[in-house]
Amino acid sequence: MTEEPCTQLASLRAELDSIDAGLLVAIRDRIEICSRVALVKREFDIPMMQPDRVGVVQDRAREFARKHGMSEDFLASVYDLLIGEACRVEDLIIDADSAVGKRGR
């Protein structure tokens, strides 16, 4: 005898919820590392935007999509969002140093 559809759905949704929880933790961890990257960039006066690095990350996402039968455009869009948030956070951290320096004059 097979499970009822509602039981099957509940089980699958629980699996999705678990994966979503892991994704949220991974995104938080990624942003935390981007914050540390921004501190290094600020300390050594490195520009926030690193187009070559963005290209490497996007290329890696597209290659992963190809290898796993996923939409390249979808994963590129996901990384556009992740990179956009990383840039926002890095800008805040890098600019915070400038604001402190300007107030101290």
Image (spheres, helix red, strand yellow):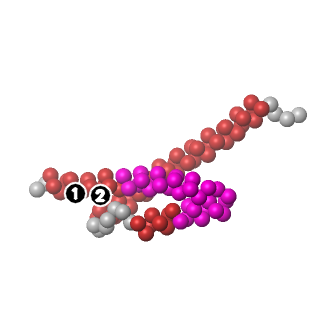
**Residue 104 place in picture, x, y as percent:** 13, 54
Question: Which residue, as the protein is rendered here, is positioned at the far front?
Answer: 73
Mark 1 closeness class: few <14, some 14–19, many ≥20 residues within 10 Å = few
Is residue 34 at least partly visible in the picture? Answer: yes
- Residue drawn 56% across the image and 56% down it: 73
Is residue 32 at least partly visible in the picture? Answer: no
Q: Secondary structure at mark 2?
A: helix
In depth, the one of 36 and 68 nearer the eye is 68
In depth, the one of 68 and 97 nearer the eye is 68
In depth, the one of 78 and 96 nearer the eye is 78
Q: Quadrant of the N terminus?
A: top right
Look at the image and give the residue range highlighted in magenta. 59-88
Q: CA distance from mark 1 to mark 2?
A: 7 Å
- Residue drawn 44% across the image and 67% down it: 53
**Residue 35 place in picture, x, y as percent:** 38, 56
Q: Which picture quadrant has residue 39?
A: bottom left
Q: Which picture quadrant has residue 49?
A: bottom left
What's under tag 2, amino acid-wise? Ile
Which label is found at residue 94? 2
Q: Is residue 69 magenta?
A: yes
Q: Is residue 82 left or right of residue 94?
A: right
The residue indicated by pointer 1 is 98
- Residue drawn 59% across the image and 58% down it: 72
**Residue 5 place in picture, x, y as percent:** 77, 32
Q: Secondary structure at mark 1?
A: helix
